[in-house]
Image (cartoon, rainbow, N blue to C red):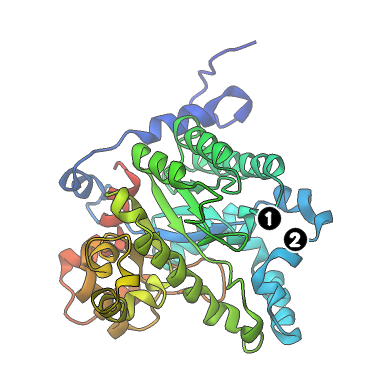
Amino acid sequence: MMFTCMTPGCTDLRHGHRLAAARKGRAAPRSRQAAAKLARDRKGRSLRVDMHCHFLNRDAAAKVAHLNPAQYEPQIKFANALTREVNVKQMQDRGEKLATVELRLKDMDRMGIDIQAVSPAPQQTYYWTEPGLGLELSRMINERLAEIVGRWPDRFVALGTVPLQNVELAVSELERCVKQLGLRGVEINPNVAGRDLTDPSLNLDRFFAKARELDIVIFMHPIGFTQGERLMDHYFNNVIGNPLDTTLGTSRLIFDGVMEKHPGLKVVLPHAGGFLAHYWARMDHAWRARPDCRTVIKKAPSSYLKKFYFDTIAFDPEMLRNLIDKFGAQQVVLGTDYPFDMGEEDPVGLIGSVPRLSAAEKERIMGGNAARLLKIRR
């Protein structure tokens, strides 16, 4: 039996509030100027929006535990014994924060974050599963994220996940994420179980076309480098492997023509854009010097790179300053990688310490850019 609950403030999901709250939260201004005006709190302070933070769905993890997911995860597969030991300790120390919203809210307040654009724990894309199971897991994760947003609509928006191992299911779930659950986009990995995003066998052009049509955010987060035999020690498959995989995935989107074919695609890169964002001139030189580097794209690769968005997880004010100088303050968004130990604990302080950054630029980076991308209304 269907009914409408009239109790003020009720959050009982059996009463259908989740979808209603999600749909209510989707409306947003179209123009950049309007978004900037609305992205403020009641006291007039610009909102601080974290574009890079994760949530672990324990139910989904339990559902695949018997399949030994570790064998498919590069950061576990390509790690020595000490790294695995440290990672286990990290989960003991931080696992509750990864899965418990109440603890997360306390940390957000401590860090000065008003809103998180919360996305799945990176390994919970589950591209290695068969497509039917992948869809079931995606739906579990997406529905839980929508529940979080529905209960705390002033503190969260969400980026879901889709089973990229099957493009038809991925497109269908993407539409459901946006149109039914009210999610603002999706997190993807830079590869699909080792296959490049532009691999013809995946036919993911349909996914990118749908993402552009829906005008949603794609947050491309790595899970370690898939050929990590040389990255076993010193946590290299995170320290080097994560930005390396982002670099390769981004290069594929540029050189294989995805960004040219789908102008306006909103792709956010974590960890300050990986290596490519700081060594872009080499690919531009190759494009000019060699015909095999310009078989698809018509312009210099960096011209497409400028269309991406980059989070602030650079760990150094001068490095972040260089990123802003190259791509502009309008392309940079606050990120923390909450709650992992490779994250930024003081994102507001880092942005505040960047040399020669104007107040207007700080407001954009702290939250104005993210509010525009995510259509956050205040």
- Which of marks 1 and 2 precedes in the sequence? 2
In the image, 174: left or right of 34? Answer: right
Instruction: Kindly indicate the quadrant of the structure image that contains residue 50.
Output: bottom left
Quarter that holds the C terminus: top left
Is 23 rendered above or below residue 327?
A: above
Q: Is residue 12 visible?
A: yes
**Local crowd at mark 1 within 10 Å, few (<14), some, or many (≥20)?**
some
Instruction: Kindly indicate the quadrant of the structure image that contains residue 148.
Output: top right
Residue that carries the numbered disc 1 in the rendered image: 128
In the image, 148: left or right of 208? Answer: right
Residue that carries the numbered disc 2 in the rendered image: 69
Residue closer to the observer: 68 or 180: 68
* Residue shown at 71% from the left, 64% from the top: 72
The three-letter amino acid code for the residue at tag 1 is Trp
Residue closer to the observer: 23 or 215: 215
The three-letter amino acid code for the residue at tag 2 is Pro
Please provide percent x and percent y for residue 36. 20, 50
Label total for image:
2
* Residue shown at 16% from the left, 64% from the top: 360
**Local crowd at mark 2 within 10 Å, few (<14), some, or many (≥20)?**
some
Quarter that holds the N terminus: top right
Name the residue furthest bottom. 234
Name the residue furthest front. 291
Instruction: Kindly indicate the quadrant of the structure image that contains residue 293.
Output: bottom left
